[in-house]
Amino acid sequence: MNDRAHAHMILQSVAGRRWLVAAALALATACSTLGSRPATDGNRPADVAPDSLARAVLVDVRQLAPDIVVEARYATANNFTGAPLPGYEANKVLLRREAAAALARVQHRATGLGYSLKVFDGYRPARATLAMMDWTKRVDREDLVRDGYIAARSRHNLGLAIDLTLVRRPDGRELEMGTPYDSFSEAAHTANATGNIARNRQLLVQLMEGEGFISYDKEWWHFSFEVPTPARFDLVIR
């Protein structure tokens, strides 16, 4: 390695450490005040971290892996509620930077096998989660809350959960997973499959778990990630 390359690596390392320190300080400040923050508008929950922190720690997954396929379902009517959810105003998927970096590594491994990730949802504004809860009441489907499919507080609000599948490259055809995304049934439980469907689900699990994600056994598409300092956000996705 020549001197110029070595100096470039040092600068990158210093910049990365500076970003981590700044984010950690901002997060510590935000967490110390969450309990007393009032709601800022009629849709925004009170117990969320400031948007300034969200902008510091959330990143568009395509910034780190531009070839990931994104189909942000909750920004459209093509989701189980039949309408776009509040807080979704663009076809983007955000994650905590640590999770996005891990997802980029998953994408790299998937492309080596002839596949690509197709992402349906990642970070979810807290107001969207509350809208889901309201929907269960309006349509008399509160059983979905009892059964663990929908919750008032979600790891999606932390930018630490992601919903996704695998597609073939280069035609973009989804691998057969047995049920559509957001199927609230036992058929969507990861282990409830046989043959090619079971193999496809297991491939997704192996790829994701290989980079530190944790699968949710009731939804083959849902995975979460852990960081030391999580915070709940309501930043609108634009």
Image (spheres, rainbow, N blue to C red):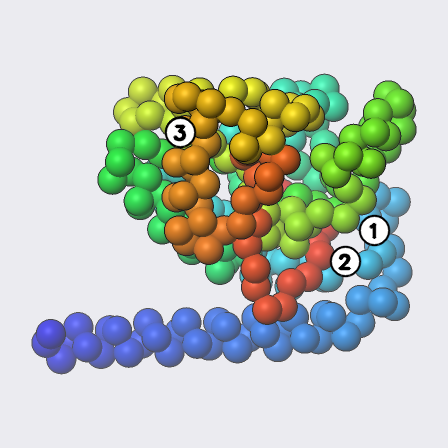
Which residue is labeled 3 in the image?
199
Toward which corner of the image does residue 219 lie, by quadrant?
A: top right
Label 2: how many Cα within 10 Å (few below 14, some 14–19, many 20+)? many
Mark number, residue 48: 2
User: x%, y% of residue 121?
Assistant: 58, 37
Residue 43, percent from left and from top:
83, 43
Q: Secondary structure at mark 3?
A: helix
Examine the rendered structure and indicate whether residue 84 appears above or below residue 133.
Answer: above
Give the quadrant of residue 82. Answer: top right
Residue 47 higher or lower than 143, as above or below? below
Q: Report whether 167 appears left or right of 180.
A: left
- The amino acid pointed to by label 3 is Arg
State the residue at coordinates (36%, 34%).
Answer: 116
With respect to residue 108, does 165 lie above or below? above
* Quadrant including the C terminus: top right
Q: What amino acid type should be assigned to the residue bearing mark 2?
A: Val
**Left or right of residue 201: residue 215:** right
What amino acid is labelled 1 in the image? Pro
Disc 2 from disc 3: Cα separation = 39 Å
Residue plotted at (25% across, 40% down): 112
Marks 2 and 3: CB-CB under 8 Å? no
Kindly report the distance in space between the C-alpha atoms of the residues bearing marks 1 and 3: 41 Å
Q: Determine which residue is flagged by label 1.
A: 45
